[in-house]
Image: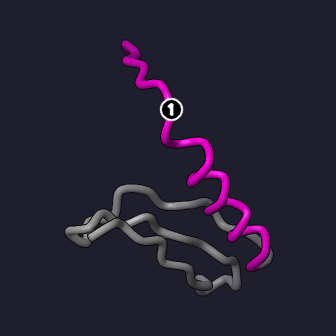
Amino acid sequence: MAGKFELWTDKGGDWRFNLKASNGQVIATSQGYSSKASALNGIDSVKNNAPGAEVVEIEK
């Protein structure tokens, strides 16, 4: 089973999404978006850009 995106509106009226792994664990949470269309664009961006994303370790 693949992961899934969950889309909802928060108490302030902003659209948000979570990306959940197949085991139900939240692995990413979005910022708030003023419209559903913008949130859906955010989901598309994650789908398009994440597969080849580089992993970079930083030191603090």
Q: Position of residue 26 (x, y in %)?
A: 33, 64
Let me know if residue 58 is in the magenta part: yes
Residue 20: name its quadrant. Answer: bottom left
Q: Position of residue 41 (x, y in %)?
A: 73, 63
Query: Toward the viewer: 50 or 58?
Result: 50
Does 8 sit above or below residue 42? below
Q: Which residues are magenta?
A: 36-60
Identify the secondary structure beneath mark 1.
loop
Q: Position of residue 48 (x, y in %)?
A: 62, 48
Which residue is located at x 42 percent, y 19 percent? 56
> From the image, which quarter does the N terminus lie in?
bottom left
Residue 12: name its quadrant. Answer: bottom right
Would you name the residue on which mark 1 appears?
53
Which residue is located at x 49 percent, y 41 percent? 51
Residue density around tag 1, few if under 14, some if 14–19, many if 20 or more, within 10 Å: few
Does 32 sit above or below residue 59? below
